[in-house]
Amino acid sequence: MTHPIDSVKTYAWVWAVLLILTALTTAVAHIDLGVFSVVAALGIATVKMLLVALFFMHIRYSDKLTKLVVLGGLLWLGLLIVLTLADVFTRGWLGFPGK
Amino acid sequence: MASQAHVETLAVREQFDTAHQQQDASTLGMWIFLLTEIMFFGGMFMMYTVYRAVYPHVFGLASSTLNEMIGAVNTAVLLCSSFTMVLAVRGAQLGRRRTVMLFLILTIVLGLVFLGVKGFEWNQKFQEHHVPGLAFHMEGTSQQGPAQLFFSLYFAMTGLHALHMVLGCGLMLYLLWRTYRGTYSAEYYTPIDMGGLYWHFVDVIWIFLFPLLYLIDRHLK
């Protein structure tokens, strides 16, 4: 009615890729990549999130206002994380007694 | 020029000009609700990140006590349920009532399988004394406090996620009943669409919970 209807084939592909990525992230977790273990785990999770949001949640077909609101939400989440970590990780820098 | 008064239907309520406009308004409203959910879970993800940075070793040990294969299988179950959910929404777009009902039932069944596996895992935690409290004990570390912190976060995050799954299953049952009664059509299926957004959102939360709780630091074991 309002936006194009995806084929079952498209959804099946997305589903298959999501399952493969789940197997991949589980396998990669057993390999020591140093700090990149976290990067790999969160990178794969982000790709999976994008697949679900763009295809299953139809963000691809959403109007601009909805897209803007979703991006705005991610921005607020980013502020929450970045500002909190900026506080937590820099508390020891000035060397006040008792931190 | 203001629009002419029109006959009110489920697809076009009085305050909307077109069905398209009404559907966009519903989608926007649903996303704003989901954003509040992102911030709700976001606080917990934040807490997890900070304490993991403070106690990296104990969090790694505690994370490695979880069975990652069970976690991976449960992730697959949830992804399958998202697939059946999107097929239910597609069925609704095409106005295929029986298809919608079939896939809603499959979605509910997969959701219940996920909750069953989760219950099995929680039960294991009780047997292993990995539930925070007086009986808590984790092998291999003297830092029992931070270890309890990990499991407190584990239960809070998976618990809150499971609660969303329970509510999701209830929502799907309601949609199933309304579909059975013939409320929805190819012209009006917004509630199924919105139910789908909710279901996929809960799936996305798990997509991040799985690596953070089960996988990170597993190679250190």
Image (cartoon, grey):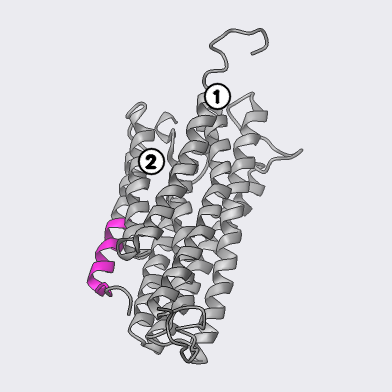
The residue located at (39%, 53%) in the rendering is A68
In the image, residue B93 above or below residue B158: below
Q: Residues within 10 Å of mark 1 (few under 14, many from 20)?
A: few
Q: Nearer the viewer, residue B144 or B207?
A: B207
Q: Earlier in the sequence, mark 2 or mark 1?
A: 2
Residue at 32%, 49% in the rendered image: A47
Q: What's the magenta region?
A: A5-18
Structural distance between the alpha carbons of marks 2 and 1: 22 Å
Residue B135 percent across, percent down from the top left: 74, 39
In the picture, residue B174 is in which quadrant? bottom right
- For disc 1, the chain is A
Q: Position of residue A45 (x, y in %)?
A: 37, 47
Please, what is the dominant secondary structure of the magenta stretch?
A: helix
State the residue position of label 1. A87
Residue B40 visible from this viewpoint:
yes
Q: Quadrant of the C terminus of chain B?
A: top left
Residue A91: percent from left, percent from top: 57, 17
Reading the image, the residue beneath label 2 is A42
> Mark 2, mark 1: which one is toward the viewer?
1
Question: Considering the numbered disc 1 on the image, is that residue within a helix, a strand or a loop?
Answer: helix
Q: Is residue B86 left or right of residue B145?
A: left
Q: Quadrant of the N terminus of chain B?
A: bottom left
Q: Residue at x 53, y 41 (%)?
A: B45
- Residue B123 belongs to magenta span: no
Query: Element at badge 2?
Result: helix
Specify the amino acid type for callout 1: Asp
Magenta span includes A8? yes
